[in-house]
Amino acid sequence: MRLSTVIVNYNTRDHIARALASLVENSGDLSHEIFLVDNASRDGSADMVRERFPTVRLLASETNLWFSGGNNLGMRAAQGEMVYILNPDTVIPPGALQTMIAYLDAHPEAGAVTCRMVFPDGRYQRTCSKLAGFLDLLFDYTLLGPLLKPWRDRRRREMWYEGWDRATNHVVEVAPGSNLMVRRAVLDQSGLFDEALKLYFTEDDLCRRILGTGCEIHFVAGATIQHEEHASINKVQRIATHIYFNDLITYMRKYHGRPAAALLAVLVFPTRAAMYLKQSLRG
């Protein structure tokens, strides 16, 4: 088996239908298995997949395993030489899968690849960044950032590879978890997603561990997919905000220690409270 694609779905029935149709139609003669992990959706997603996509392997969970747990369920079942982690709100055009696989074949130093993503209207999405350090997390998510705005803004530009228009190949440190193809042999070394991180900083953590195996992560400009962005998150916006801050502090604790995480938890409180208030006022 050459490729295993894993998609996690939560109440995105219409999106997942388009994503699966594009994958099935554009796999060509590629040896390709597709897994759809359904996180206890209530919109009939699982039944739709059973009826319309009999070749897709449906893994229906009775509970919401979130992003990390759902992807891990699919990746454990995957048999492909490459594993493609893909969001449900995507459309894969002809040749995109084959281009990324060919790139991995031609670049043994790359343990994982991603590619260009565009919105439905054709605008390109700014993806891929450098790994965030302690100060990056501190100044990005607390009121310390505005106090040192010139430093913060300069660092943000560096983090997002200022000057790179995503039209050329590039070695990156963090690739999006919505569109990430990884060699199975690399995943066996790095491990899968950390399920302590439910929704956020999941790719930061996984990419850090992929880099730790000695491999590189490459952006492949020759392939482009369409991505609507935030389709699943929009279904659970209130709880997603709560999970966001919990995942932020968990990630800080994992890589920068308990004292750093405790400091961040205190300093981020005003930002957290403001977001909760804003959501409450919206009703």
Image: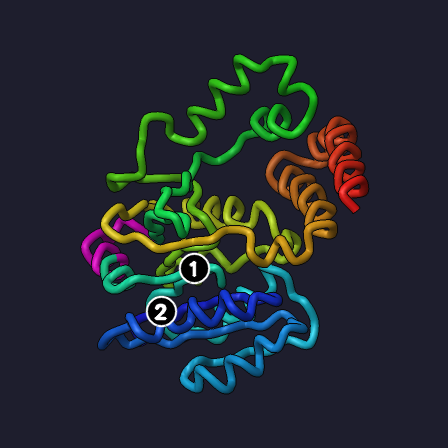
Q: Quadrant of residue 55?
A: bottom left
Q: Which residue is mark 2?
A: 22
Q: Give the camera-side residue of 1 and 120.
A: 120
Q: Dot 1 lies on which element?
A: strand
Q: Amino acid at mark 1?
A: Thr
Q: Where residue 103 appears, x then y in whole percent?
A: 23, 55
What span is colored magenta in the figure? 100-111
Q: Does residue 95 appear to the left or right of 136 in the view shown?
A: left
Q: Is residue 101 magenta?
A: yes
Q: How did the renderer colour the structure?
A: rainbow
How far apart are the two marked residues, 1 and 2, measured between alpha carbons? 9 Å
Q: Are marks 1 and 2 in contact (CB under 8 Å)?
A: yes
**Residue at screen point 75% across, 26% down:** 267
In the visual, does 266 lie left or right of 198?
A: right
Residue type, label 2: Ser
Kindly identify which residue carries mark 1: 90
Instruction: Establish if 82 lies above or below 162.
Output: below
